[in-house]
Amino acid sequence: MSAQEHNPGAFLDLPPEFADRTRARVFVLPIPYEATTTWVKGTACGPAAIIDASHHAETYDEIARDEPFRGGIHTLPPLAPAGEPAEALEDIRRAVADLASQEKFVLSLGGEHALTIGAVRGVADVVDDLTVVQIDAHADLRDEYEGSPLNHACVMRRLVDNFPIVQVGVRSLTVDGARLIEERGIPVFFAERIASTCPFKREEIPVWMNEAIEAIPTRRVYLTFDIDAFDPSIMPAVGTPEPGGLHWYQVLTFLRTLFERRDVVAADIVELCPIDGMVAPDFLAARLAYAIAGHALRA
Ligand SMILES: [Mn+2]
């Protein structure tokens, strides 16, 4: 069954009063876009897997001790752009710009990372002074890959000329990417440094986290979350599982601190590549999506 045929319904399976389009402040936009993934295929099934899994999640937030869904989360029909990548990314741009212009917080669920190019441009059509905060195992700074400048390995290279970027969790890049980071002084918070602050202490914001947020030069942020930023021990369902990744509570603390100190105006979660019969990664992605939506609804 293709992602297009499978209609998983609404995120969290909320009662209609909390999923209503007019009232909702957060819009979940499934984008089962997959055109350029290079190794393991399957990110087109990511959005449906996240929404399916969300139906089994509790809607009470045990850390914040609230029920953020009451602010309203509307799930849009999947946007599955066809055609050449350039055209598909323009479709995504237009859809996201339209929602952003209605002052909705758009949480796009991928799909492959290339969709972020369209989504960021769409948000930037409506709001200015945007920094892209990227949580990812990869720097994604290749100028082109396998003949395409719109490959998912080139996402940040396509954005870095127009937006300040801050990268968190990186542990895989090319020598050209490393040179670009040095030349431009791109703030990159490598996974190795983040890991060295373990064990994680409660009630204490690690130094790297403070520095990462201080490195964001604007108030407004677009957050792109490549799920392979997580350690493969908890997130094996990705195309390129890089060892030495982030862990759950580190990520939750980073997100909480980021939303407290910056105005995060839109986000995406990309690159989930579901594994048949293994629900834990899908469930993690669903919990992550609700964590991000929850912060957006409290803001
Ligand atoms: Mn990645």
Image (cartoon, helix red, strand yellow):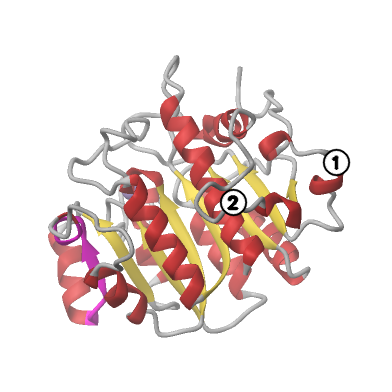
Residue 153, which numbered label? Answer: none
Of the numbered discs 2 and 1, the one sitting upstream in the chain is: 1
Q: Which residue is mark 1?
A: 16
Query: Is 186 colored magenta in this rendering?
Result: yes
Q: Quadrant of the C terminus?
A: bottom right
Residue span colored magenta? 184-194
Kindly identify the residue that appears in the image at 18 percent across and 40 percent down: 243
- Give the camera-side residue of 28 and 247: 247
Q: Is mark 2 within 8 Å of ligand 1?
A: no
Q: Secondary structure at mark 2?
A: strand
Q: Residue at x 62, y 34 (%)?
A: 51
Residue 105 or residue 211, whichever sits in front: 211
Residue 88 in percent (x, y) is at 60, 50
User: Is disc 1 surrounded by few (<14), some (14 to 19) or many (20+) residues within 10 Å?
Assistant: few
Type of amino acid under label 2: Ser
Q: State whether residue 245 is above or below residue 177.
A: above
Q: Is residue 156 above or below residue 146?
A: below
Residue 68 screen position, x and y as percent: 66, 54
Q: Is residue 219 above or below residue 154?
A: below
Residue 195 in the image: x percent, y percent? 17, 54
Q: Position of residue 250 (x, y in %)?
A: 32, 54
Q: Is residue 230 left or right of residue 106?
A: left
Q: Is residue 163 magenta?
A: no
Can residue 226 be seen at all in this image of the molecule?
Answer: yes
Q: Amino acid at mark 1?
A: Pro
Q: Are marks 2 and 1 in contact (CB under 8 Å)?
A: no
Mark 2, mark 1: which one is toward the viewer?
1
